[in-house]
């Protein structure tokens, strides 16, 4: 692959089609998702794309009961930090899980969602 950068735009375009891609730093090997311009670990700018399985577990979550402006009709909903199998964490909206059954460690799987006509990161339930 000759493309050296996975831009945020490409990241979300791929996510919309159900593919999650992280980037791995050519300097120190750190994984980043969503893509960043510079490696937060070593400051390098040599990324290579790494496909992710999309499988992970909920590391923490917050139930949004008072939503940001423009999202009021969507509340309540949950935003979770999901620790992916590859070792990186990604924030996303939890879908198809009753809010009162959310739990740390719950297995989830990436699912592309659309929020207000924009592609977004979602996570739905998965069997352990
Ligand atoms: Zn690095």
Image (cartoon, rainbow, N blue to C red):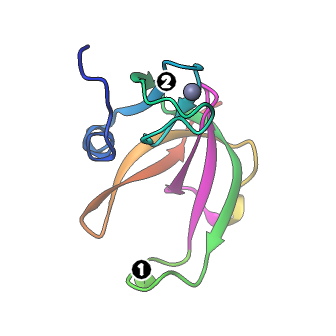
What residue is drawn where x is 55% and y is 34%?
43
Q: Is residue 50 left or right of residue 19?
A: right
Crowding at mark 2 (Cα within 10 Å: few <14, some 14-19, many 20+): many
Q: Is residue 93 left or right of residue 41?
A: left
Q: CA distance from mark 1 to mark 2?
A: 33 Å
Q: Which residue is mark 2?
A: 24
- Residue 93: horizontal and vertical position, in percent? 50, 58
- The residue tagged with tag 2: helix, strand or loop? strand
- The segment highlighted magenta reads 77-99
Q: Which quadrant of the view contains residue 78? A: bottom right
Magenta segment: does it hold 113?
Answer: no
Q: Is residue 112 left or right of residue 74?
A: left
What residue is drawn where x is 74% and y is 52%?
103
Q: Nearer the viewer, residue 127 or 55?
A: 55
- Residue 69: horizontal and vertical position, in percent? 43, 86
Split into quadrants, the picture shows ligand 1 in the one at: top right
Total label count?
A: 2
Q: Residue furthest front?
A: 43
Tell me: is circle 2 under 8 Å from ligand 1. Answer: no
Question: Is 38 placed above or below 96 here?
Answer: above
Question: Is 13 placed above or below 27 here?
Answer: below
What residue is drawn where x is 26% and y is 13%?
1
Q: Residue furthest top?
A: 1
Q: Which residue is mark 1?
A: 71
The mark lying in front, picked from 1 and 2, is 2
- The residue tagged with tag 1: helix, strand or loop? loop
Q: Which quadrant of the view contains residue 42? A: top right
Q: Earlier in the sequence, mark 1 or mark 2?
A: 2
């Amino acid at each position: 692959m000759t493309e050296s950068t996975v831009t945020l735009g490409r990241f979300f375009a791929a996510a919309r089609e159900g593919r999650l891609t992280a980037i791995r730093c050519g300097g120190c090997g750190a994984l980043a998702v969503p893509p960043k311009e510079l490696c937060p670990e070593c400051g390098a700018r040599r990324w290579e794309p790494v496909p992710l399985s999309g499988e992970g577990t909920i590391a923490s979550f917050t139930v949004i009961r008072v939503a940001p402006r423009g999202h009021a009709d969507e509340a309540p909903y949950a935003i979770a930090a999901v620790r992916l199998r590859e070792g990186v964490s990604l924030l996303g909206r939890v879908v198809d899980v009753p809010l009162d059954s959310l739990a740390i460690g719950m297995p989830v799987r990436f699912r592309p969602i659309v929020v207000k006509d924009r592609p977004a990161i979602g996570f739905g339930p998965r069997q352990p």
